[in-house]
Image: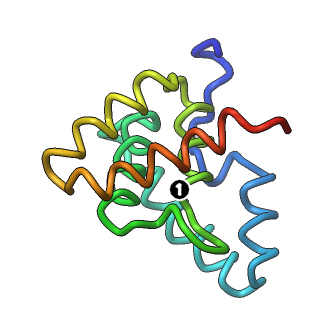
Amino acid sequence: MSKNSLKKNAVLDDQQLQANLKAINPKFGDFVIRVAGEAWGLPLIDQKTKALITIAVDVVNQDHVGPGNPFGTHVYMAMQQGATREEIEELLLFMCVYAGFNKAAGCFGALNELLDSPT
């Protein structure tokens, strides 16, 4: 993905993400879009780094399981911002040290399901 095709705001510039959030619940979707859109719009941390941070938070919170889990969304957001699978895998290895090996293991499994399953 070229740098020119990256979204300036990974929330406010992604219509599909917004539709998916509103599909969970319209009021929830609107709330998340407004609040997260503002946070993603803060200028000092780039969008790719923010997306990688959200994946790290998902590891800690174990947000890779169950319906409505944000892990897959955050993986796709990171990749839309130029992150590679290898960078995400390295992040998961890094998180083994700080969140625990078992937490990262589940996320490796979820990552494999996301990226290796036929679409």
Taking the view exactly as shown, the residue that stands out farthest to the top is 2
Tell me which amino acid carries mark 1.
Answer: Phe
Indicate whether 13 appears above or below 83.
below
Quadrant of residue 100 within the rendered picture: bottom left
Indicate whether 4 appears above or below 15.
above
Report the front residue among 43 and 49.
49
Q: Where is residue 47 in the image (x, y as percent from the top left)?
A: 46, 38
Q: In this view, does 8 lie to the left or right of 47?
A: right
Q: Position of residue 28 (x, y in %)?
A: 66, 83
Screen quadrant of the N terminus: top right
Which residue shows up at 71% across the image and 87% down it? 27
Which residue shows up at 75% across the image and 38% down it? 117
Which residue shows up at 79% across the image and 52% down it? 15
Which residue shows up at 57% across the image and 44% down it? 9
Per the image, label 1 sits on a secondary structure element best described as: helix
Q: In this view, does 116 lie to the left or right of 20?
A: left
Q: Where is residue 107 in the image (x, y as percent from the top left)?
A: 44, 50
Quadrant of residue 114 within the rendered picture: top right
Q: Name the residue under label 1.
A: 71
Report the front residue among 85 and 11.
85
**How many neighbours does mark 1 have within 10 angstroms: few (below 14), some (14-19), or many (20 or more)?**
many
Taking the view exactly as shown, the residue that stands out farthest to the right is 119
